[in-house]
Amino acid sequence: MHGMRCRKCTEVAVINMRQHKLALCGAHFIEWVHGRTERFIGKRRMFDPADRVLVAVSGGKDSLSLWDILLSLGYRVDGLYIDLGIDGEVGYSHKSRLHIEKFIRDFQPEAKLHVLDVKGTYGESIPAVARTTRRGREKPCSVCGLVKRHEMNRIAYELGYEILATGHNLDDEAAVLFGNTLRWNAEYLVRQAPVMPSDGMGLARKVKPLFRFYEREMAAYALVRGISYIEDECPFSVGATSLYYKGLLNQMERDCAGAKLNFYLNFLRAKDDGLIHSGEPTPLHACERCGQATGIEGLCAFCRLWEGMEAKKAGAAG
Amino acid sequence: MVKISYRDKQWEVPPGITVRGMILKVGLNPETVLAVRDGKLINDKAVLPGGAEIRLVPVVSGG
């Protein structure tokens, strides 16, 4: 009736990971996740115990689990929550923040959280920007991603963190890889990696310590640890291309255990073997307004976005 | 019967089926959900007894 037993003891298994041919009980699953995370941080030279790490937390299973894992492993990690002002008739951003605050109360009361309120800082929420700009009307997730990337970089730099960690898991990475491969976007393929070095223009090193874990494993980690997280989808993600790609990859995984893992790991091996090239890398410039690195001269995409918002507001007022 | 809930959907399936079999039977992909009984995660080869109430937790997120 209980199905499988833990490979390491006689307890009932809580999870069966077909891609690893491994079933584990709750205690050994947590131990396995911690051990693998530490191993991959070291193998990919992401950071050392002496480094100050800023982890971007959204209230979802991946980022809260990552924060929990890194603190449990003894790393110096603070959190950053970016309040995007997304309501979607479900109070999405507000609910997300409540999960983060509960996590700190229940699991890591000594943890430090930085909060950035996008509307309080720039005058408009992400949904308002998405409605107003052409980029946002076509792809609201694109505006959201652009603002989050820029603000994570800015805050890590201003607060002196050497490392910026995000909760991207293997499913996230495989979906991005799938999209880049469909378009044969060599420049993006070259850049996609679990570690992105500092660009030498003041940006922190970016790392993805969960890059070898399936999304299913991270949800299991949160459930076994008792971490409360936001299960609702972001109301703007309905119809997002990345979710469509994840659906396709999960169909393959259902019929062929390990399909996602092999797809992504063989890509990393091909990169390490020098098989993926693009032309000359785009030269970087400092944005004239914010100073962050950008591939085009003048303003970066983030500053152009807000400049466009200001122009629309001025036009409406005039 | 075994009661299954997933977001705002509910089903009933006959007892004696495995978790993985049940997930496929209700038309979901086992890679995209986890099964929870009485607040505890259960593995996909566990056989469901009559009267059990199972919550399926979605694992896919992002945008």
Image (cartoon, rainbow, N blue to C red):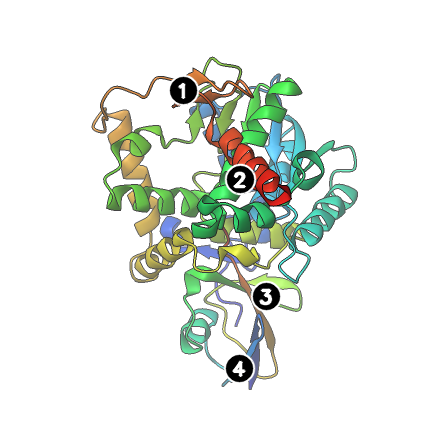
The mark lying in front, picked from 4 and 1, is 1
Amino acid type, residue under disc 3 in the picture: Val
Residue placed most toward the observer, A133 or A250:
A133
Q: Secondary structure at mark 2?
A: loop
- Residue B2: x %, y % from top left: 56, 82
The mark lying in front, picked from 3 and 2, is 2
Spatial distance from mark 3 to mark 4, Cα to Cα? 15 Å
Give the residue pinned by disc 2.
Answer: A167
Q: Disc number at residue A297? A: 1
Residue placed most toward the observer, B26 or A192:
A192
Pointer 1 chain: A
Residue placed most toward the observer, A38 or B49:
A38
The mark lying in front, picked from 3 and 1, is 1
* Callouts 3 and 1 in the same chain: no
Assess disc 4: are there few (<14), some (14-19) or many (≥20) residues with their C-alpha within 10 Å of its C-alpha.
few
Pointer 2 chain: A
What residue do we see at 43% from left, 70% from top?
Answer: B28
The mark lying in front, picked from 3 and 4, is 4
Q: Disc number at residue B36? A: 3
Amino acid type, residue under disc 4 in the picture: Trp
- Residue A30: x %, y % from top left: 58, 45
Of the image marks 2 and 1, the number of the one nearer the N terminus: 2
Q: Is residue A245 left or right of residue A235?
A: left
Q: Are marks 4 and 1 in contact (CB under 8 Å)?
A: no
- Residue A250: x %, y % from top left: 37, 58
Spatial distance from mark 3 to mark 1, Cα to Cα? 53 Å
